[in-house]
Every structure is written in structure tokens, then in C-alpha cells.
Image: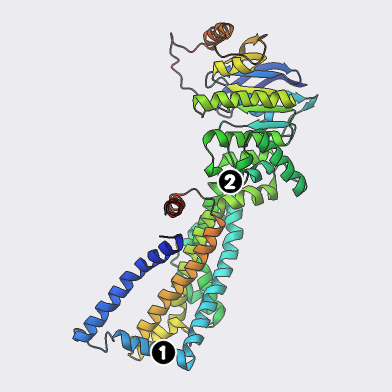
Amino acid sequence: MTAFGRRLGGSALGWALPLLLLCIWEAIAQAGLVRANLLPPPAAVAATLWGLAKSGELAEHVTITLLRVLLGFLLGTAAATVLGALAGYSGTWRRLLDPTIQGLRSVPSIAWVPLFILWLGIFEASKITLIAVGVFFPVYLNLMAGIRETDRKLVEVARVHGYRGLALVRRVLLPATLPAYVTGLRGGLGLGWMFVVAAEMMGASEGLGFLLIDGQQTGRPAVILTSLLLFAVLGKATDLVLSHLGRRATRWQDSYAAQQERSADAADRAGFQAI
Amino acid sequence: MLRIERVSKRFESGTVALRAIDLALDRGEILGIVGTSGSGKSTLLRLVAGLDRPSEGAVLLDGVPVTEPRPELGLVFQEPRLMPWLSVRENVEFALPGRPRRERRARAEAALARVGLTGFAEALPRALSGGMAQRAAIARALVARPEVLLLDEPFSALDAFTRMALQDHLLGIWHHDRPTLILVTHDVEEALVLSDRVLVLRARPGRIHAEYQLDLPRPRKRTDPRLQEWKERLLLDLDLGLGEAPSEPDFAI
């Protein structure tokens, strides 16, 4: 099998379970085991999706939700990058910042909602801030840990060759930290999606979270399921983008997963030559 | 050219790693330093490299005190310590910050050719064997053309065959450039095969116990009976404590 073929085969395997669930779902609906006003058949959900898409509503909801996640993600990541780098690089900054940040982390993030609404109103600012708060912590924690765990021996090599300050950060600390940073970004994005739902359920007139509440209040489970499905697809898609970028930036990593991938590729090449 | 004047090193824990070391090296000399762990031999090398500061005394390179790492002082560690995200060539170029790209590249390629790694210039470090990685580390230390090359047990993590090959390799490089070499090792034979002079350090506190001038021509055969005689004397000097086992723990640095 070629590398491409195997990748395709690998993702085909990933599709098996969702398809099986879909079949079971359809079977339950067909057999009438659950009332349709509680669990509509897949066809009804597809029709809802189609209807929303045709009216242009779908694009609107998806766009606004994506935009909120994106802005919150950028804002939270920016703050976390600056503070995480400071706390990771300098012991003084860490002793100054970290206890406070760890303290704030213990506040369940949804608990900020009333305060944000009071301060920032019920429109976009409070929503985006809430998402940014969610994104902030995993990025901050991973970046700080990544910098602190950078191999002291590599830093010493850089010192021997006269690297100081910014040059040391750029040439050694940054590349060494990148894998942990990417992990943080992916975790942050996941929380970003969680918080956009919270924000949109709490008061919005559009967005996928609003669609959820709307479906519940108007008794249309097909709308709720459609929204859930879209969250799954969008969340997975955005994570794929990040993990793909991350993999490109950290290709040098000698981890187990990378090893597996390489040896599989090598086996492919060997097999290819044998043919 | 390199002088170590009454250098002592005390750690914050109170351990005296080195006490009153006096030493002078000639240009192009190969000095071997042997000692058991805890004898302060690596500490001494780090002081010379400018990575640590002595508690007392000074290290002088051409009369100027060494207080921080300098390009004239190349250092090879026990492990290769290559940046895993840089190719082998980029790792060597790493030792030439601030130079124009073209010059960096040309010099790195020349240094890699000297250690026989031309074919691996674009490989990532993870693709190298232990011996190849250490050769890349030597190329990185050489590329800045240091006057003094400091080697901290550079071959101790390698198998016996690779170690011998790299020892010969190091001599080849030395014949070519004649840098001053300080080789810290716990392998007595390695010190004897390579050095003009061998120091024996003893621990608690780290101090020079004995010093031998080796007037044997190079290349030296490892089987040379004179070498074997030296070896026995050195092993006695090392006081490996076969009779009276030390009860204190060793602080390997």
C-alpha cells in the first residue's frame, strides 16, 4: 500500500464507527423504538440541515460562531503566549504571575459569565472574552512548562557559542518549546469550542449555540442534532488544521508516533522496491 | 598561552570541587586529565570554558581572564547535544552566529568533510549513530577555529571500536590545525594514547595528584609495552579505592 493509500485507509477506518452509529440510529427510527419527536430519523436531520443551508441561515450561524471562536482564540493565545513566555523564562516573573494565574484557573470559567455580561454587555465583547479566558489556560500552562523543561544541556551549548537573550530564545527556546506550545494551542481550541457554546446559549440571536437553545425551546430535536453534528465537524476540522500545522513545525521530533509513521513509510518504500 | 592560576571552586552546598589548581599549557599541547568521578575534572573544564566562574583564582587565555564562553574556546561535551530540529549542517553553522550565510555554509561543509560526515549534512540528528553524532559535535566545536579545544569525556558513551576510531580521528584533526587540546577522560588508555602530558586528579577536594610528561612519539600503538607501564602507574595514582572503599557518596558533576 502506498503512504497515500494507507492514509486514506486509516481515515476510512475512522469513518467506520460514525457510519455504524448512523445505521443503528436509522434502524431505531425505522423500527419506531423511540418517538420521532424525541429522536428524529437521520433523514429528518439531513432535511433540516438542507433547509438551513438553502435559506442561508446555516452560513450565518456557522460564520458567526467560527468568528467568535477565532477571535477568542487569537485573544486568549496572545495573552497566554506573552505571560507564559515570561513565566517560563524568568523565575521572578513566574513567582510574580503564576500564583495569581493558578488561582484564577480555579474559578470555573463559566462563573465569569455574569461579570463579563455586567461589564461588557450581552453582545460580542463578553462572548469573545469568555472564549479567550477558556483558551488562555491550556496555552499558558503548556508554554510555561515547555520553556521550563527545555533541555538545559542545549541551552548550555548555545551559551558556549555566545547566544544570549533574544537570540537564545529564538534559536533554542522557541524551537524546543514548539511541541508543547502546539499541544497547548490544540487544548485551548478545544476549550474555545466549549465556551462558545456556553456563551451562545446564554444569550445570542445567532450562532450554533443559539440554534441549540432555539431547537430546545421550539421543540425541534432535529435542529438540536443538526447543531451538535456541526459542532463535531467544525471542532474536528479546526483541530485538524492546527495539528497539521503543528506537525509540520515539529517534524524533527523523535517521538514514538513520529517513529511509527516513519517506519511505516520506510516499510512502504521497501515494499515498493521489492515489487 | 592558557594559564590556570590557583583556581578553586566551591559549590553552594559547601562541597569543594577544586582546590588551588595551578596549570599552564603551551600552544598546540595535548593535555589529558584523568580522575575518578568527583575529582573535579569536568568542573575544571567548565571553568576553563567560561561556563562557570572559579570561586578563587583565574583562568587566563593569552593573559586575559576567561569570565564567559569565548569563540577561542571550543567545547565538546560527553553527549553530542545537537539541536534535534536542525539538520547536521545547521547544527555546525549554529557555532557561527552573526556570520554571512554563505560563509557559514561553506565553513560548516568544510568542517563536516573533516569529520567524514559530508553525506549526512542535510540529515536530522536522529538519523545519526552515536559516533556520527559525536563527530558532528566535534565539527561544531571546530568550525569556529578555536585556539583551545576542550573535550569533556567526549568518547565515553561510545563503543570501544568507535571510540578508537574517533581517537585517531581527533589526532588527525590535531595534526592539521594544531589546536591546544584538553581532554578530560576516565579512560586511562585514551589519555595515554593521545596526550603529551597527563594530569591525575584526586577527589575531596579536587586537586592535582600527579603529572606525567609522555615523551612517546605519535602515533602510539595501544599495545606498546611502555604505554602499559604508564597505564599501571596511572591506575595506582588514581587510587581507585580497591582496598578501602570510600564511605561518602560521590558527587559526580
In which quadrant of the rendered view does residue A12 lie? bottom left
> Residue most toward the front?
A275
Instruction: Count neighbours of disc 1 (C-alpha within 10 A) and say few if under 14, some if 14 to 19, many if 20 or more.
Output: some
For the point 66% across and 52% down, the residue is A170
For label 2, the SS is loop
Question: Can residue A93 be seen?
Answer: no
Nearest the viewer among A173 and B205 is A173
For label 1, the SS is helix
- Identify the disc placed on residue B123: 2
Q: Position of residue A176 (x, y in %)?
A: 57, 49
Q: Are marks 1 and 2 in contact (CB under 8 Å)?
A: no
- Identify the disc placed on residue A50: 1
Q: Position of residue B246 (x, y in %)?
A: 45, 15
Instruction: Count neighbours of disc 2 (C-alpha within 10 A) and say few if under 14, some if 14 to 19, many if 20 or more.
Output: some
Q: What residue type is disc 2 on?
A: Ala
The nearer-to-camera label among 1 and 2 is: 2
Q: Quadrant of the N terminus of chain B?
A: top right
Q: What residue type is disc 1 on?
A: Trp
Nearest the viewer among A38 and A110 is A38
